[in-house]
Structures are given as C-alpha cells and as structure tokens.
Amino acid sequence: MYKSNIDPAEKLRAEFTSWLATLMRRARIDYFRSKEREVKTISLDEVNETGFAVQDEYPISESSFQFEEERLARAFFSLPLQRQQILTMLYVDELPPEEIARLLHCSVDNIYKTRRRTLNSLRKMLDELEGTT
C-alpha cells in the first residue's frame, strides 16, 4: 500500500485552500451574473414633471383629445402630466409601447404598468364624478 508522508495538518490546509478558492470563484461568477440581469429603471411617478424627457415633444392640450363627456376630460386633465403623455402617445399618436419606452428611457413593462394604473385611476375618478353629479 502507498503510504503518504504528508502531514495531516498540511493536507487539511490544502483542502481548505482549494475549497475556499472554489467558493470565491463561484461567488464572483454569481455576482457578475446578477449584475448583468439588473436593469436600472425608475418609476415614472418618481420623476418630477420638470425632469420629464419628452415633455416638450408631446405637449398636452385639451384639443389633443376630443372628449364626448366633460367628466372624462376633467378626469384626464387631473392626471399627472407623465400619465397624460403616455396615454396620448398610446391612444392618440398610436405609438407602440416599445417606442414609448425608448422615448421615455424606461422599460416596456413600466409603460404597461403605468397604462393599467392610469386607466384604473380614470375609472375610479369617473365613478367618483358620477356619484357627485
């Protein structure tokens, strides 16, 4: 039988060093993989209206939409400017969400979420306005 002259403490130190090097390499790979997937976006609600990139390109006026009901017009113009601009780009200019996301420097998912939230807000405001008239 082959008998090793290696000290057990040295053997343990070598195994530990090898294990630690593997652990560090895998941790570094995991870290860089997580950074590759990270998309830096902020919600449009967090951006103040003066910092909105497309504000000048899509001015919103009451003539942009032709509202059949005054209630809808009041509800629409009570929305934040960013949400008005997104709805205008979607429904008046008929831009695809991907193009809007590119113009606003945000994710397409953010456009879809903002549209859903805005339409829900409009429905809620219209219900409230209907109850007051």
Image (cartoon, grey):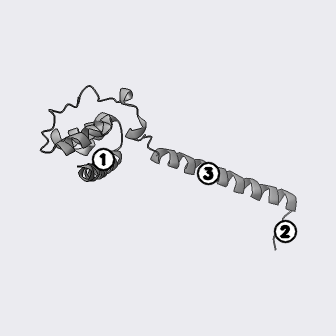
Disc 3 residue crowd, few under 14, some 14–19, many 20+, Cα 10 Å: few
Q: Position of residue 119 (x, y in %)?
A: 27, 50
What residue would you read off at disc 2?
A: 3
Above/below status of 51 relative to 130: above
- Find disc 1 in the rendering and name its residue: 118
Quadrant of the rendered structure where residue 92 is? top left
- What amino acid type is highlighted by mark number 3? Ala
Q: Which residue is mark 3?
A: 27
Q: Residue flagged by tag 2: what amino acid is it? A: Lys
Where 10 falls versus 106 (above or below)?
below
User: Of tags 1 and 3, which is closer to the observer?
Assistant: 1
Q: Earlier in the sequence, mark 1 or mark 2?
A: 2
| Callout 3 secondary element | helix
The local secondary structure at tag 1 comes to helix
> Are the residues flagged by discs 1 and 3 in contact, CB closer than 8 Å?
no
* Marking on residue 13: none
- Of tags 3 and 2, the one toward the viewer is 3
> Is residue 7 in sight in this rendering?
no
- Give the percent coordinates (x, y) of residue 20: 71, 53
